[in-house]
Image (cartoon, grey):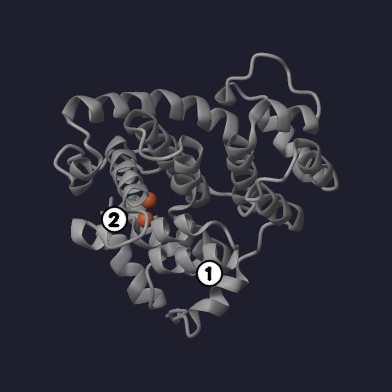
């Protein structure tokens, strides 16, 4: 019988997850500084050719809606603007964590993308969060699961395959993680995002994205960001994006989040529809290398 890899030091485990490339870290810091100019960003990005070329490739996808072809990294910085560039750098780096992706990695990436897309839609319709920031928060909400895939590949694969084959609910997956590792992915994810030194909003969202108590969420500093991703996560699950099948146990209308966000039934159904359409395009453009 395999011994469970109980985590003794969660912060050490978080540090075992590969950090973002140095250049990406530098760019993230620079994007938080209002004195940063486009040419400074382009200069730094150009020092990492592999990152620059992946950014360029994705910048040209219809997802960003740019009409003319973006031919250089300085052009990309100029055309996309800082917040879209930030979401692109994080997307490229997060995707880079998956080496030799199989079914588990593919489904997890699809789920993360779906939640990112739905979060961006909700932020757009409600005006409660900057849409690119919502996209990143959605993309990173399950980074704890990605971390398990990276650090404890075999042990996590068992859980992920059971979740996939037995159609487990989100709660059941969290319980299995606690049993196997001692922590669920929300806790791990929030630690990893702190180690990565990303803006605090992302680690708060990762920590609380399964919280259903409005009181608890409202005590946090970014309650709306948490509610947006919480709702987006339910929508992705209900649609079956990143799962074997739609999770019919999920009711996307009667959720604690819709009230916090001022979303009524029609709004939610529009978000669901837009998520499905945008997700399909995004998956083709942002998919993992097969
Ligand atoms: Fe989760
Ligand atoms: Fe999730």
Q: Nearer the viewer, residue 250 or 36?
A: 36
Q: Is residue 290 visible?
A: no
> Which element type, helix, strand or loop, lies under badge 1?
loop
| Residue 184 in the image: above or below residue 226 | below
Residue designated by label 2: 170
Residue at 46% across, 38% down: 130
Q: Position of residue 118 (x, y in %)?
A: 38, 35
Q: Earlier in the sequence, mark 2 or mark 1?
A: 1
Q: Nearer the viewer, residue 27 or 92?
A: 27
Q: Calculate the distance from the C-alpha at mark 2 to the C-alpha at mark 1.
A: 20 Å
- Counting the numbered discs, the total is 2
For label 2, being within 8 Å of ligand 1 is answered: yes
Q: Position of residue 85 (x, y in %)?
A: 64, 38
Q: Position of residue 230 (x, y in %)?
A: 31, 49
Observer-side mark, 2 or 1, equals 2
Residue at 28% across, 24% down: 270
Q: Which mark is residue 152?
A: 1
Q: Nearer the viewer, residue 236 or 153?
A: 236
Q: Nearer the viewer, residue 15 or 97?
A: 15
Q: Is residue 100 left or right of residue 135?
A: right
| Residue 158 in the image: above or below residue 108 | below
Q: Quadrant of ligand 1?
A: bottom left
Residue that sits furthest to the left in the current view: 254
| Residue 249 in the image: above or below residue 8 | above
Image quarter in which the C terminus is found: top right
Quarter location, residue 67: top right
Image quarter in which the N terminus is found: bottom left
């Amino acid at each position: 019988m395999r011994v469970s890899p109980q985590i003794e030091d969660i912060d050490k485990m978080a540090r075992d997850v590969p950090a973002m490339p140095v250049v990406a870290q530098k760019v993230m810091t620079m994007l938080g500084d209002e004195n940063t100019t486009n040419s400074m960003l382009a200069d730094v990005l150009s020092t990492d050719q592999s990152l620059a070329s992946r950014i360029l490739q994705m910048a040209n996808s219809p997802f960003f809606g740019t009409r003319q072809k973006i031919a250089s990294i300085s052009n990309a910085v100029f055309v996309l603007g800082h917040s879209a560039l930030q979401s692109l750098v994080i997307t490229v780096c997060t995707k880079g964590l998956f080496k030799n992706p199989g079914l588990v990695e593919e489904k997890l990436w699809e789920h993360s993308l779906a939640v990112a897309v739905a979060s961006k839609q909700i932020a757009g319709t409600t005006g409660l969060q900057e849409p690119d920031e919502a996209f990143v928060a959605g993309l990173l909400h399950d980074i704890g699961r990605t971390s398990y895939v990276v650090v404890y590949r075999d042990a996590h694969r068992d859980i992920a395959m059971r979740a996939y084959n037995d159609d487990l609910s989100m709660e059941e997956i969290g319980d299995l993680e606690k049993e196997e590792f001692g922590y669920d992915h929300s806790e791990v994810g929030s630690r990893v995002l702190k180690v990565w030194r990303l803006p605090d909003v992302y680690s708060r969202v990762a920590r609380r994205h399964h919280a259903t108590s409005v009181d608890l969420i409202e005590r946090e500093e970014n309650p709306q960001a948490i509610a947006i991703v919480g709702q987006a996560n339910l929508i992705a699950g209900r649609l079956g994006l990143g799962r074997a099948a739609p999770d019919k146990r999920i009711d996307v209308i009667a959720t604690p989040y819709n009230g916090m966000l001022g979303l009524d039934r029609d709004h939610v159904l529009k978000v669901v529809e837009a998520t499905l359409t945008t997700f399909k395009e995004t998956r083709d453009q942002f998919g993992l290398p097969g």
